[in-house]
Amino acid sequence: MTSADQTEAVQDTGNPAADYGQASGHGHNNGRLVPLAIGAIGVVFGDIGTSPLYAFRETFASHHGAPGIHVDPVHIYGVLSLVFWSMMIVVTFKYVLTIMKADNKGEGGSLALLALINRKSEHARWTGPFVLLGVFATALFYGDSMITPAMSVLSATEGLQYVAPGFKDWIVPIAVAILVLLFGMQSYGTERVGRLFGPIMMVYFLTLAVLGVSHLAIMPEIILQTINPLNAVNFFITDGFRAFIAMGSVVLAVTGAEALYADMGHFGRKPIGISWMAFVLPSLMLNYMGQGAMVLSHTPAEAAQLIKDPFFLMIPDAVRVPVIFLALAATIIASQAVISGAFSLTQQAIQLGFMPRMQIKHTSASTAGQIYIPVINWGLMIMVIVLVLFFRSSSNLAAAYGIAVTGAMFIDTLLLAAVLISLWRWPLWKAAPLVAVFIVVDMAYLGANLIKVPDGGWVPLTIGLAIFTLLTTWSRGRALMRQSMDDGSIPIEVFAKSAHSSATRVAGTAIFMASTSSGVPSALLHNIKHNKVLHERVVILTVAIQDVPFVDPATRASVIDLGAGFYRLTLKFGFLEETDVPATLKTVDLCGQPFEMMKTSFFLSRQTLLASAKPGMALWREKLFAWMLRNAASAMEFFRLPTNRVVELGSQVEI
């Protein structure tokens, strides 16, 4: 991955809380504001929108051997106040008004932010640890993308027992069937279904609000109690450590907040911010307050039963069935969003050099972001179903939920600190208080969730550590392999002069793919060694993935004429762009003449890795890297090269 000649992709602003409605890198305009805002409701807020199904309930449940919180006004007000201020601090102030200003040419997410920091601070000593933090946040997202569909679909399916008691024994089989159907549909793409997401989620959020208001009418004073932060403080004074444990469940109310930043490139800051402030936040809080009002409006004995499942029990009998099916549809949409997010994140990780090449299928001719990655899809499906069969209920799964999210949020705060100080050049006296508030809140939630490790929290941590090992092993292995290949390479200028006088030239164009922009590709060396011929035009092609999501087509290609019919061509792509080499070559006329695919041959090097005792990586990691290398998709498939115009030449490399 190179960083030369890159276009600056962020406006370094000192006021992240200023108008977040400035145009993003994708040029969203006010004319499309309403459709984008509706689309954001359908995609961005699916995860956080399904939290009312279980978050309030889990806060009052017993955890880790400790008895549940008493169901009385002090605790109801305390929990609601914690939920409200969590949404304000974590979602509104941290993500909507602060982190979303740190865009990488309009794109967001941990990897996009990491690429931005890495490019802007290329030679700083502290960037290494931040790279590892960003990679670990990526690994935690995969754990979250496995738990979210399991948790969401299970919680909604459990509502079927309130339709008919006989459904109780069928909850797990029905959930598994829904998940299999959901993952099975991914290969068809989500473009058509996605058009329905916004309207369905709008109806769902309106339903949340109406349900909440219907119970708030009985006890309107709960609104003032909710926004009063002293009730949250009083909760901790009254219960101490049990209140701290409860924070591990309160954070379930803000799971999905990181999706606002990750999906920013699809919708823009302003549509997401408006949707959150004007529609989603009020709907969620009205529902949470309605659940609290419903519980408090009953006798203590009745309240103890209602708190076991307040969301489904607050639904009137007359509309119970349609609302339950609406909630089920919302959880499927939330699951779809996180699955699509896993596909997009994988594409970014591949382009940025943290994952081996994989088969990527484009499911839409008009939308570049609509992709499908079979390996990720089926791997996720297997893990999600295993989680459902292992935990068997959303309450059991709640113990595993939250650690991945709070860990990623904490890392986002650390990356934000680097942005404020290094990119925006904020003075310490200005940046430190803001970062300190976010860190205190994040550490409180992370600490509360770490207590869940013995009860299931080990699941996302184990998944995250395993994926982190794979990502870092691949990145380190590629660096060592390139270093090993560079050590034995010769300058292309020297090679071109000697080869021109000693080899027979034949008609046509030969393109030799090279991973670096220096030296002679091993395929070219092997070709002249064994075949002793050279084409009239020899192009050394390097595909360079930049630290920006999109590259200006005018600066995509750069050529160095080496003489004697040799050219070194570099094609630059953003980490969100499709690397379609043949299509791009048709637009290049810098190598003497246009490229004709029927007269062009592509030569690829396929390396076989030999693990050795050389310093650099542990032997077990070298073997792991070799396994990943063997199973990576071929360059021919990844770069969309014509199959009948490709020649592969093998070589062995030691690292």
Image (tube, grey):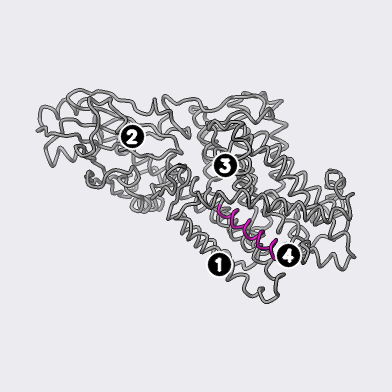
Residue 152 image offset from top left, x and y in percent: 63, 59
State the residue lying farthest toward the bottom: 166
Decide which of tag 1 and tag 3 comes sooner along the chain.
1
Residue 568 image offset from top left, x and y in percent: 27, 28
Foreground pick, 40 / 491: 40
Residue 209 image offset from top left, x and y in percent: 76, 51
Q: CA distance from mark 2 to mark 1?
A: 43 Å
Name the secondary structure under disc 4: helix
Label tally: 4
Name the secondary structure under disc 3: loop
| Badge 1: residue crowd in 10 Å (few <14, some 14–19, many ≥20) | many
The residue at which mark 1 appears reads as 176
The residue at which mark 4 appears reads as 320
Compared to 263, does 156 lie above or below? below
Q: CA distance from mark 3 to mark 2?
A: 27 Å
Q: CA distance from mark 1 to mark 4?
A: 23 Å
Decide which of tag 1 and tag 4 comes sooner along the chain.
1
Segment tinted magenta in the rendering: 319-336
Q: Amino acid at mark 4?
A: Arg
For image coordinates 61% across by 25% down, the residue present is 424
Closer to us: mark 2 or mark 4? 4
Image marks 2 and 1: residues in contact by CB distance under 8 Å: no
Q: Judge whether residue 323 is colored magenta.
A: yes
Query: Which numbered marker is on residue 263?
Result: 3
The residue at which mark 2 appears reads as 584
Compared to 83, does 169 lie above or below? below
Q: Amino acid at mark 3?
A: Asp
For image coordinates 60% across by 40% down, the residue present is 35
Q: CA distance from mark 3 to mark 4?
A: 32 Å
Decide which of tag 3 and tag 2 comes sooner along the chain.
3
